[in-house]
Amino acid sequence: MKLYSAKGAPNPDRVTFFLKEKGKLDQVEIEELAILEGQHRLPEYKAVNELSRVPALQLDDGTVLCESRAICTYLESVFPEPNLMGETPLERAQIEMWDRRVELMLMMSIAGWFRHGHPKASALEKRQSSEWSEISEEATKKTADYFDGVLAKTEYVAGTRFTNADITLFICMNFGLYMRYKIWDGRPNLTRWFELMQEHPMAQRD
């Protein structure tokens, strides 16, 4: 298998961190693309993913899977241990529910803040809007408060054990640093959770 990635970008990191937690990162060939330099728009990558988005996973038979959540679902089946997406119908639904909440509520807010507020992101967002950046910043902070409240009631995002939803939230913590904002700072439950995440493979530097 070959993974087309972009280290430091949230959606590619979702897949590489997922593989790290599985202990299977060394079983996948990885090609890093410099998206701020436009490498994902080159013809050779468009031949892999016509939408010019990363990540993309190319299987040994040439089949290409795109979208980070779909790729992780495939990898969960190929590498079932440790389980990260649920072992029962209810647990699978709960993990997906929380994973989607993190993605749609927090990650998307940070993305708007970054894409419209960071100078280097002009390579990705041709028409940056300072107003949208401010709206997204406010939404990021409000949503961070929400998840601080969630983690006041549970040890992990989706319940009593580490799951894919924790990977997604951890990526949001890293993503916020691009705007020099420590999402966990001043939020005791997020801080406790973030410190717990430091023990995981995904937090270890390559």
Image: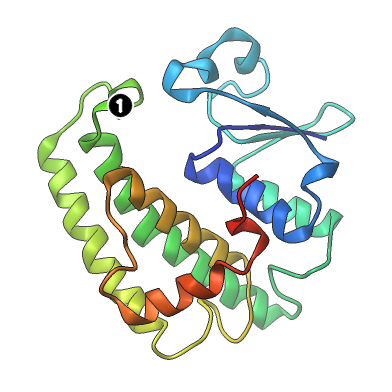
Q: Which residue of the protein is positioned furthest toward the left in this rendering?
A: 131
Foreground residue, 48 or 152? 152
Q: Which residue of the protein is positioned furthest toward the right in this rendering?
A: 61
Foreground residue, 151 or 188? 188
- What coloring was used for the rendering? rainbow
Q: Residues within 10 Å of mark 1 (few under 14, many from 20)?
A: few
Residue at image coords 77%, 46% = 25
Residue at image coords 63%, 71% = 163
- The answer to which image quadrant residue 151 occupies is bottom left
**Residue occupied by mark 1:** 120
* The N terminus lies in quadrant: top right
Residue at image coords 22%, 67% = 142
State the SS at label 1.
Answer: helix
Q: Is residue 85 left or right of residue 189?
A: right
Residue at image coords 34%, 78% = 148
Q: Position of residue 102 (x, y in %)?
A: 43, 64
- The answer to which image quadrant residue 30 occupies is top right
